[in-house]
């Protein structure tokens, strides 16, 4: 609910603060910018659900975008498959590392450095080429990006998996309490592996979209996605300690981060203050669930005390 209210406030401020906000071109630009973030944040939700963080998603998206653009002029369409296999490899590496008992933060931080280093070995500046058919995915139908309905469908499918399928229940149980999940017969290590593979796959799809949009491979293009994906999940109401996530909230949180810089730009706010606002927003999103939980606990204690007194 807070993210929905915040998004509504952003839209109202944008509409009232600038006549250019509600134009078709501006809305199309925001929706295009938010598409890769929606994909990455959807995958990040699975990792956070099982009490982890994936810091390698930005580098994974960069790896796919640059690999496809670099390899396509040489091998043709198999470059797309090669890029997606590379993304899956990162997810498997992260998953097995966490499954072996290593800290998710450290494992994904290491893979971030490794993957970014690999990218710089074969491309240090933007270049390459992508097929026209792939570039069309980043096109528009009116003010709506071609890929956006597909991304929303992917997020909806992810929500179904997370809430109504055994693998999703296992991931949530692992995030809630790994020890209890293990005692209940859930294969905790496999759940963690699946979560990181899903996250890497979503980052790979985002990399394909970035390559389609820019029609080239930029070795730095995916870097903002890492922190923004975590922020989108938290803004949507998910808990970083795992076990409680909402993919609907993740989608709303992604739109919040997509519209925030656009509204601030159109209303004349300097870039420095934009970063400050984003940071304060993230802190508020982290503190709000804690405050709500404490209020609920206090109310429950008051009710319990009143009941005992009455008896």
Image (cartoon, rainbow, N blue to C red):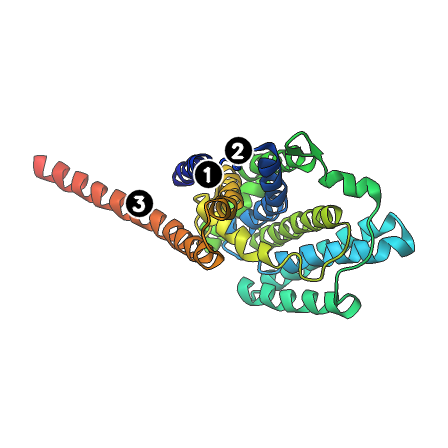
Judge left or right: residue 172 versus residue 212.
left
Q: Residues within 10 Å of mark 2 (few under 14, many from 20)?
A: few
Secondary structure at badge 2 equals loop
Q: Residues within 10 Å of mark 1 (few under 14, many from 20)?
A: many
**Residue 186 seen in the current view:** no
Q: Position of residue 109 (x, y in %)?
A: 59, 66
Marks 2/1: CA distance? 8 Å
For residue 121, what is the image quadrant? Answer: bottom right
At 67% across and 48% down in the image, what residue appears? 206
Q: Which quadrant is home to the N terminus?
A: top left
Which residue is disc 2 drawn over?
Answer: 22
Q: Residues within 10 Å of mark 3 (few under 14, many from 20)?
A: few
What number is the disc on residue 292?
Answer: 3
Compared with residue 131, is residue 109 higher up or lower down, i.e. above or below?
below
Q: Between disc 3 and disc 2, whose residue precedes?
A: 2
Q: Are marks 3 and 1 in contact (CB under 8 Å)?
A: no
Q: Position of residue 302 (x, y in %)?
A: 16, 42
Judge left or right: residue 235 versus residue 229.
left
Marks 3/1: CA distance? 29 Å
Q: Are marks 2 and 1 in contact (CB under 8 Å)?
A: yes
Q: Which one is nearer the viewer's eye here, 110 or 186?
A: 110
At 58% across and 57% down in the image, what residue appears? 224
**Residue 111 seen in the current view:** yes
Q: Which one is nearer the viewer's eye here, 67 or 17?
A: 17
Secondary structure at badge 1 equals helix
Q: Which quadrant is home to the C terminus?
A: top left
Q: Nearer the viewer, mark 3 or mark 2?
A: 2
Residue at the extreme top: 142
Secondary structure at badge 3 equals helix
Q: Between disc 2 and disc 1, whose residue precedes?
A: 1
What number is the disc on residue 14?
Answer: 1
At 58% across and 36% down in the image, what residue appears? 27
């Amino acid at each position: 609910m807070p993210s929905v209210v915040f998004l509504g406030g952003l839209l109202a401020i944008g509409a009232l603060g600038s006549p250019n906000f509600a134009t078709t071109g501006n809305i199309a630009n925001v929706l295009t910018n938010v598409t890769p973030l929606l994909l990455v944040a959807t995958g990040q939700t699975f990792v956070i659900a099982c009490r982890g963080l994936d810091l390698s998603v930005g580098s994974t998206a960069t790896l796919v975008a640059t690999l496809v653009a670099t390899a396509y002029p040489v091998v043709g369409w198999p470059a797309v498959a090669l890029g997606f296999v590379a993304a899956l490899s990162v997810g498997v590496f992260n998953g097995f590392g966490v499954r072996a008992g290593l800290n998710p933060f450290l494992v994904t931080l290491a893979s971030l450095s490794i993957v970014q280093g690999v990218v710089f070995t074969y491309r240090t500046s933007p270049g390459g080429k992508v097929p026209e058919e792939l570039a069309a995915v980043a096109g528009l139908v009116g003010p709506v990006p071609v890929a956006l309905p597909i991304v929303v469908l992917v997020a909806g499918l992810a929500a179904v998996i997370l809430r109504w399928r055994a693998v999703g229940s296992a991931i949530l149980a692992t995030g809630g309490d790994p020890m209890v999940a293990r005692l209940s017969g859930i294969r905790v290590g496999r759940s963690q592996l699946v979560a990181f593979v899903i996250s890497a796959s979503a980052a790979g799809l985002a990399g394909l979209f970035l390559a389609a949009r820019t029609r080239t491979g930029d070795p730095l293009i995916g870097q903002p996605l890492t922190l923004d994906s975590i922020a989108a999940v938290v803004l949507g109401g998910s808990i970083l300690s795992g076990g409680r996530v909402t993919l609907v909230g993740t989608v709303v949180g992604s739109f919040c981060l997509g519209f925030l810089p656009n509204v601030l730009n159109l209303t004349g706010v300097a870039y420095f203050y934009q970063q400050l606002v984003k940071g304060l927003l993230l802190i508020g999103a982290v503190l709000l669930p804690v405050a709500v939980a404490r209020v609920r606990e206090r109310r429950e204690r008051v009710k319990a005390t009143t009941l005992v007194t009455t008896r």
